[in-house]
Amino acid sequence: MHLMELPREVLLGENLAGETVNVAKRLKLGRRVLVLYGPKTKKIAGEEVEESLSREFEASGVVVRGATMEEVERVISVIRETSADWVIAVGGGSIIDVAKLASYRTEIPFVSFPTTASHDGIASANASIKDLGSKTSVKARPPVAVIADVKVIKTAPYRYLAAGVGDIISNLTAVRDWQLAHRIRGEYYSEYAASLSLMSAKMVMKNADIIRLGSEESVRKVIKGLISSGVAMSIAGSSRPASGAEHLFSHALDMLAPKPALHGEQCGVGTIIIAYLHGLKWERVRETLKRVGAPTNAYELGIDPEIIIKALTIAHTIRPERYTILGKEGLTWEAAEKAAKITGVI
Ligand SMILES: NC(=O)C1=CN([C@@H]2O[C@H](COP(=O)(O)OP(=O)(O)OC[C@H]3O[C@@H](n4cnc5c(N)ncnc54)[C@H](OP(=O)(O)O)[C@@H]3O)[C@@H](O)[C@H]2O)C=CC1
Ligand SMILES: O=C(CO)COP(=O)(O)O
Ligand SMILES: [Zn+2]
């Protein structure tokens, strides 16, 4: 049996902090709510959401710092102490992932209230959590509702929106890797999930100039792509349609770089190199990233070229079960250096 779980409500609009109350009432989420936010997103929208919910429910808030297993366990304890009926995550990808996994493990629903359009975990069913030093993709449940407030998301520096484009354009190579794994390893493949995922990537390529404006319309375009990408992951039952070798490269950078860039920025640069390895039109990927003002090379990522090469050579070891163009052996140092040089990444 293949179970697909999807969000029940997706709200995209302006000034939605107060709407959280109506969503909770419609979906009968319960009286006690735990609001999760980060040190910055607390001020950006977290407090406002908590205040709105406090008028009708018993709301308490907790500050989360980073997507680690320790934070997930700490939040699980707070859920139990406060007997929370549901959770709402107000923040970037890290806060949403912690809320997603903690609510799944305590079997309560969670609502996603993104403050950035930088990642496609907004509506997905899986959580990317750092455990014992490396990022793992853990099964969870998608949010029962997504409340995307364009005004809040627009407060984030433009860099975050461009990172969202990087996370979406990754779908081009992720789907290629998935097809490869299907053909070579007989892995389950969903044509429907793959098409939906590719559609998001094509939409951002087509709308790059509108996205570049950094307007509310830009935010809407990127958010829709991120949500569709998350839905594609839910349909597939894994992050396969949106995470291939370019994501392994980004996870490797998170482990190796003293100061990693944003997830979506790293994935975008990874897509350029992995598209080259797949024999795809990598120049088109680079062109789109340039047009939206996302990084396309090591210098713009603020990462040393040696670390880029090293990350390419170890990427295949991060999730050995996830077969990609990197194969079982991975890239040699020379091959990695050549691919990075040809594509102008180093
Ligand atoms: N589960 C999935 O399917 C997916 C998960 N991911 C995961 O998501 C994470 C990346 O998410 P990302 O959002 O890039 O990074 P983070 O969630 O780590 O956020 C980065 C920083 O941005 C801050 N921030 C958030 N909103 C705003 C805002 N409106 N204005 C200014 N600053 C803001 C955060 O504040 P604060 O310090 O308050 O938190 C934080 O300091 C990675 O861990 C990645 O693995 C990515 C894609 C898919
Ligand atoms: O980031 C993702 C999709 O964009 C999914 O994350 P994983 O690489 O952790 O599976
Ligand atoms: Zn991603």
Image (cartoon, grey):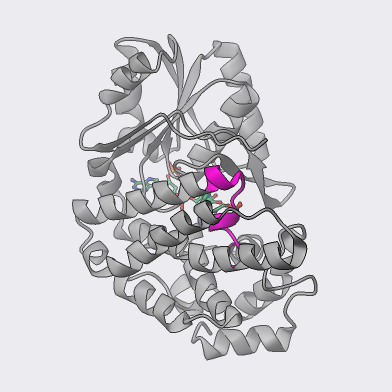
Q: Residue 183's image quarter?
A: bottom right
Question: Residue 58's x, y, as percent?
Answer: 41, 10
- Who's the residue at 75% across and 83% down the image? 332
Question: Is residue 291 something that shows in the picture?
Answer: yes
Pick whichever, 167 or 344, lies toward us. 167
Residue 59 inside the magenta-drawn segment: no
Report the predominant secondary structure element of the magenta stretch: helix
Nearest the eye: 121 or 171: 171
- Residue at the location (39% across, 62% down)? 165
Judge from the rendering whether residue 51 lies leftward or rightward of residue 102; answer left or right.
left
* Relative image position of residue 241 (x, y in whole percent): 55, 56
Residue 313: % across, % down: 71, 75
Magenta stretch bounds: 233-247
Left or right, residue 60 beside residue 156: right
Task: Single out the residue that lies furthest toward the right.
Answer: 329
- The residue depicted at 41 percent of the width and 15 percent of the height is 59
Left/right placement of residue 1 relative to residue 51 reads right
